Image (tube, helix red, strand yellow):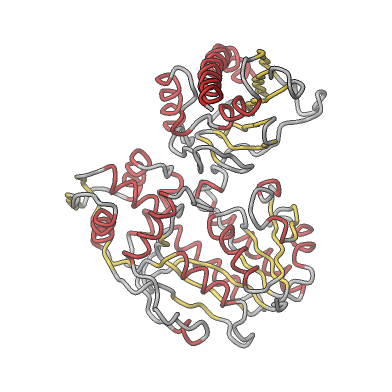
Amino acid sequence: MNDGGQVLVTGATGYIGGRLVPELLSAGYRVRVLARHPERISSRDWADDVEVFAGDATARPDLRRALEGVDVAYYLIHALGSGPGFAERDRSTARRFAVVAREAGVRRIVYLGGLHPDAERLSPHLESRREVEEILLDSGVPTIVLRAAVILGSGSASFEMMRYLTERLPAMIAPRWINNRIQPIAVRDVLRYLVGAASIPPEVSRGFDVGGPDVLTYREMMQRYAAAAGLRPRIIRAVPVLTPRLASLWVGLVTPVPPAIARPLVGSLVHEVVAREHDIAQHVPDPPEGLIDFDRAVELALARIRDLDVRTSWVSASTPGAPSDPLPEDPDWAGGSLLVDDRSIEVDTTREALWTVIEGIGGAHGWYSWHLGWVARGLLDRLFGGPGLRRGRRHPQHLAPGDALDWWRVEKVVPGELLRLRAEMRLPGLAWLELSVEGEPGDRPTFRQRAVFSPQGLPGQLYWWAISPFHGIVFGGMQRNIARAAKEHGAGRRGG
């Protein structure tokens, strides 16, 4: 394999970054990733093929280490859905990256921005993307900006928003922007352009509009999605009264995409976003079979979903505002006292059957106990801006560090032994839930459930007092499901 040079990918745990890394490796590049949570890289198929730098793109020392010796740097960072002040955070992070990249002698920056019209007042989200684009182009480092509109691919926030709206609403009232023209692009074509941008000559420093072969209204996209998914045509009525804010709240109720992320996505759809040029083809030629059209892109995405092969998703990123502190391993943790509810029981089954029950918790399987109570807790969390139960899980049987699991984030997995979840729901403190298999091999295993909470003030103490009974409910539900799994396992052995 030819050595294509050293590249740095920021945002490698995100939707695009996680798919770009293996494409760059296949193209012969040596890849380095900068990640705030490097443990989330460990479960990726390509983890052993890249150099992982633990650090934060907002910290100059971390950037200096990561950018040293780099030829091409991919800037895939944005503060989408991070609340008020996101634009300033985007600006300051981009400026810092631009300065350090120039000082480190980086030969090329590649940025994936948003397709936007000229001579219009842009939505805050698109305006922020435009500002970042200008900062990087003015950095003194040759920069390629790829501007894309709706990206079609399994797990894309834009695609999932369209998918759930279409599937869940056979009839709907929609904002006027549903009739605006959009030029979507398949994620495979986005990745091809991103990889190709690394080898564009250094004298080229500019932005390029990228889009697929179809220009459609959002209404047409929904109807064509319905046809591809085998659904009846949707009844859609456009009204002038739904503002982007109201529309984003509506999207947040109907789809898994929370309002904090839906709002900038909806705000972008207020504009018609159609490519004004196709100059990128001069440097990254179109494939012989042409760019992937809308219907084919939907077909590919649905196949990934059916085959449980969604490699990255918008939920790969943490919920904005959610805690990210790992569980303190030191019992005398200096950050404050930890409240612990610890329960265990010896169970009459195999370690393998017990682990299957543990790893299968959440998502479509539910929490094995008092389903109505968990649904109510999820709805309450959504009302306060948390993820609730909307995210589900990436795979019905298997979990990996960094996976979203309803209102939890998988923090640690030791296969066959330990599953640790960190709460991303709205709480007056930090919370973790550990489910583990203990005991000596050959003996009957012990199931252990450990809930840990670091309260914030009196509200945190009161919350722990109120929520403690739920720990027993979860534990009881797990016991019942373990017993059921034990019977099925025993029947399987007898049948065998």
Q: Is residue 137 above or below residue 179?
A: below
- Residue 467: tell me if it is visible: no
> Residue 121 vs residue 331: left or right?
left
Q: Dividing the picture into quarters, in which one does residue 5 lie? A: bottom right
Whole-percent x, y for residue 252 in the image: 38, 41
Whole-percent x, y for residue 292 in the image: 38, 71
Front residue of 337 and 197: 197
Front residue of 229 and 420: 229
Front residue of 240 and 165: 165
Q: Residue at x 76, y 76 (%)?
A: 105
Q: Dividing the picture into quarters, in which one does residue 154 lie? A: bottom left
Q: Residue at x 75, y 31 (%)?
A: 328
Whole-percent x, y for residue 302 in the image: 38, 54
Say which quadrant the N terminus sits in: bottom right
Say which quadrant the C terminus sits in: top right
> Residue 293 vs residue 339: left or right?
left
Whole-percent x, y for residue 463 in the image: 57, 17
Give the total of numbered labels: 0
Q: Is residue 32 above or below residue 173?
A: below
Q: Residue at x 52, y 25 (%)?
A: 492
Front residue of 429 and 439: 439
Q: Is residue 10 above or below residue 362?
A: below
Q: Is residue 387 above or below residue 369?
A: below
Q: Residue at x 44, y 75 (%)?
A: 209
- Residue 189: tell me if it is visible: yes
